[in-house]
Image (tube, helix red, strand yellow):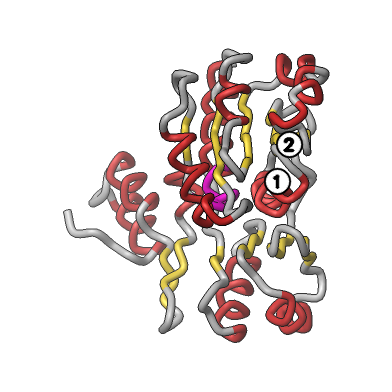
């Protein structure tokens, strides 16, 4: 059956019997694309993937971001804009006065409701210098419905700091571990817990860290079985993976 792009046509087809309910659901999950010329906004992403579209601001013009952001807000979804510098944020603030900004995360957001406080999602950093990447993950989770707990600056250079927080580690359902330098912390955490661990290498470190490649390789070669690794400085990607895991856990509960 030919795919329809208009919601009214799909509903009319169901009403007159030319489209059965199963086919209509299939079409609806793939509909909702709004063409604004320079972008095709995917309003159907939550239906397919569980979370709405997020704007990646880097390399986009402020006017382009503004148009996309307004369409997402008008659709009733929470708004998240990642990799947004302060100058672009100030422009967007004039268009969306309720827009908020996390400077460390370089992310702007506009939420619809308070995130869940019982989520069991924990974000851990090796050092204070890794916090900006961790905050990108945290803001992503908070904007899209999950309130993570933060445990910062507990790296292997002072391993007692991590071990003193064993209760928090034991209570978590999914853990994001953010580390630069040699990237050892995810292996340590992965050896202490039974829940999923998502490792995020950061570009923090001295010369031979090669702007995050050294911790990336360390995490990919982790001796703790089952540690998942995302790209360098990709707090957003880690958050999205963690929330997919959380959703599965909630469905099974």
Q: Secondary structure at mark 2?
A: loop
Q: Residues within 10 Å of mark 1 (few under 14, many from 20)?
A: many
The location of residue 131, given as percent across then percent down, is 73, 49
Side of 18 where 88 appears, left or right:
right
Which of the labelled discs sits on residue 148, or is there none? 2
Which of the labelled discs sits on residue 138, or is there none? 1
The location of residue 200, given as percent across then percent down, is 56, 42
The location of residue 70, given as percent across then percent down, is 63, 74
Look at 64% across and 22% down and name the residue there. Answer: 173
Look at 68% across and 74% down and name the residue there. Answer: 85
Of all residues, the one furthest to the front in this rendering is 207
From this view, report whether residue 168 is shown above or below residue 68: above
Between 199 and 143, the residue placed more toward the observer is 199
Distance from the alpha carbon under mark 1 to that under mark 2? 6 Å
Q: Residues within 10 Å of mark 2 (few under 14, many from 20)?
A: many
Residue 154, picture quadrant: top right
Side of 2 where 87 appears, left or right:
right
Between 115 and 242, the residue placed more toward the observer is 242
How many numbered marks does the figure carry? 2
Q: Is residue 150 visible?
A: no
Q: Which residues fall within the magenta stretch?
A: 232-238
Of all residues, the one furthest to the left in this rendering is 1
Between 216 and 228, the residue placed more toward the observer is 216
Residue 239, picture quadrant: top right
Say if the magenta span includes residue 32. Answer: no
The location of residue 183, given as percent across then percent down, is 57, 37
From this view, report whether residue 134 is shown above or below residue 199: below
Q: Earlier in the sequence, mark 1 or mark 2?
A: 1
Image marks 1 and 2: residues in contact by CB distance under 8 Å: yes
Look at 75% across and 41% down and name the residue there. Answer: 115
Q: Secondary structure at mark 1?
A: helix
């Amino acid at each position: 059956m030919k795919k329809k792009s208009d919601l009214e046509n799909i509903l009319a087809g169901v009403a007159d019997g030319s489209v059965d309910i199963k086919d209509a659901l299939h079409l609806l999950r793939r509909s909702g694309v709004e063409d604004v010329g320079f972008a095709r906004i995917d309003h159907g992403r939550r239906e397919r993937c569980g979370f709405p579209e997020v704007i990646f601001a880097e390399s986009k013009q402020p006017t382009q971001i503004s148009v996309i952001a307004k369409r997402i807000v008008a659709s009733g979804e929470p708004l998240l804009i990642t990799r947004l510098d302060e100058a672009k944020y100030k422009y967007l603030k004039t268009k969306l006065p309720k827009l908020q900004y996390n400077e460390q995360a370089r992310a702007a957001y506009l939420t619809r409701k308070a995130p869940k406080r019982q989520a069991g999602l924990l974000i851990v950093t090796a050092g204070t210098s890794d916090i900006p990447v961790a905050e990108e993950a945290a803001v992503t989770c908070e904007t899209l419905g999950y309130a993570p707990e933060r445990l910062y600056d507990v790296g292997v250079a002072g391993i007692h700091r991590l071990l003193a927080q064993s209760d928090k580690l034991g209570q978590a359902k999914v853990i994001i571990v953010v580390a630069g330098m040699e990237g050892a912390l995810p292996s340590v955490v992965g050896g202490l817990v039974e829940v999923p661990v998502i490792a995020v290498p950061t570009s923090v470190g001295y010369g031979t860290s090669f702007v995050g490649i050294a911790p990336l390789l360390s995490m990919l070669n982790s001796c703790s079985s089952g540690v998942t690794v995302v790209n360098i400085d990709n707090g957003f990607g880690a958050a999205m993976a963690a929330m997919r895991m959380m959703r599965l856990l909630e469905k099974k509960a």
